[in-house]
C-alpha cells in the first residue's frame, strides 16, 4: 500500500507556525495546495500571506465563487470563495478557500447575512473587480469593499445567475429587457 501523501507545501508550515491557536484544513491535489479557512479568519490569514517574507504572495490572480449544491460528496458549506495567490519571489501558487452556508432561501435576491466575507481589496487592489463578479453572480458580499455593486448584470437584476438553483433558461429577464437598436439610440 503506498504511503499517504504529505502536505509539504512550505506555506502550510508558515501558517501553522503563525496561527498556532487556530484550526485550519489543508489539502494538496496534483501539486496544488489549498488552505481552508473560516470566514472570520480570512483577512488576517490573507494579510499574513502577503506580508510574510517566507510566503510573499504579492499577486492575487483571481477570486472565484463556487456553488456546491447537489455536489456528490458532502462539503462544509454550499458556497465557497477561492483566492488564487502567486508569489513571484518564490515561484509558488497557493489557494485559500472559504466555505459559506446560506441562512436564507437562495432563490431570490435577499442579502443573506451568512454569505459575507471580508474584502481583500485593501491588500490587493485588483480584487475589486473579481469580488464584484462573485457578488453579482453568487450574491456573496464582501465587507469593506470600496464599490460593491453589480458588474455583469444590471443593478435591479432579480437574482444571482451562477447559483445552481437559478433556472438555466432564466426567469423571463431577457424577455423583459429593453433592446435598443442603432436607429432609436
Image (cartoon, rainbow, N blue to C red):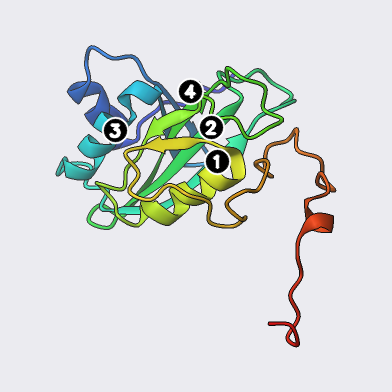
Gap between marks 3 and 2, in whole Å? 15 Å
Q: Is mark 2 in CB contact (under 8 Å) with mark 1?
A: yes
Q: Is mark 4 in CB contact (under 8 Å) with mark 3?
A: no
Judging by the rendered image, the residue that carries numbered circle 2 is 80
In depth, the one of 7 and 157 nearer the eye is: 157
Q: Position of residue 29 (x, y in %)?
A: 52, 36
Gap between marks 1 and 3, in whole Å? 17 Å
Gap between marks 2 and 1, in whole Å? 6 Å
Using a 10 Å C-alpha cutoff, classify the residue at mark 3 as few (fewer than 14 neighbours), some (14 to 19) or many (20 or more): some
Judging by the rendered image, the residue that carries numbered circle 3 is 43
Q: Earlier in the sequence, mark 3 or mark 2?
A: 3
Seen at 28% across and 14% down, the residue is 22
Seen at 76% across and 80% down, the residue is 181
Seen at 21% across and 47% down, the residue is 56
Q: Earlier in the sequence, mark 4 or mark 1?
A: 1
> The residue tagged with tag 4: helix, strand or loop?
loop
> The residue tagged with tag 3: helix, strand or loop?
helix
Gap between marks 4 and 1, in whole Å? 17 Å
The tag on residue 113 is 4
> The residue tagged with tag 1: helix, strand or loop?
strand
Say which quarter of the image contains residue 76.
top right
The tag on residue 65 is 1
Gap between marks 4 and 3, in whole Å? 18 Å
Amino acid at each position: 500500500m503506498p504511503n499517504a501523501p504529505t502536505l509539504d507545501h512550505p506555506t502550510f508550515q508558515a501558517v501553522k507556525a503563525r496561527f498556532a491557536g487556530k484550526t485550519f484544513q489543508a489539502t494538496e491535489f496534483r501539486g496544488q495546495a489549498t488552505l481552508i479557512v473560516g470566514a472570520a479568519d480570512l483577512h488576517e490569514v490573507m494579510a499574513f500571506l502577503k506580508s510574510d517574507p517566507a510566503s510573499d504572495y504579492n499577486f492575487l490572480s483571481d477570486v472565484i465563487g463556487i456553488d456546491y449544491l447537489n455536489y456528490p460528496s458532502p462539503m462544509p458549506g454550499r458556497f465557497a470563495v477561492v483566492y488564487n495567490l502567486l508569489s513571484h519571489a518564490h515561484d509558488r501558487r497557493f489557494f485559500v478557500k472559504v466555505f459559506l452556508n446560506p441562512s436564507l432561501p437562495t432563490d431570490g435576491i435577499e442579502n443573506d447575512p451568512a454569505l459575507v466575507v471580508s474584502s481583500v481589496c485593501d491588500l490587493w487592489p485588483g480584487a475589486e473587480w473579481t469580488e464584484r463578479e462573485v457578488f453579482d453572480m453568487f450574491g456573496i458580499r464582501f465587507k469593506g469593499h470600496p464599490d460593491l455593486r453589480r458588474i455583469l448584470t444590471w443593478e435591479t437584476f432579480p437574482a444571482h445567475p451562477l447559483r445552481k438553483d437559478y433556472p438555466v433558461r432564466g426567469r423571463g429577464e431577457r424577455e423583459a429587457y429593453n433592446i435598443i437598436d442603432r436607429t432609436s439610440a
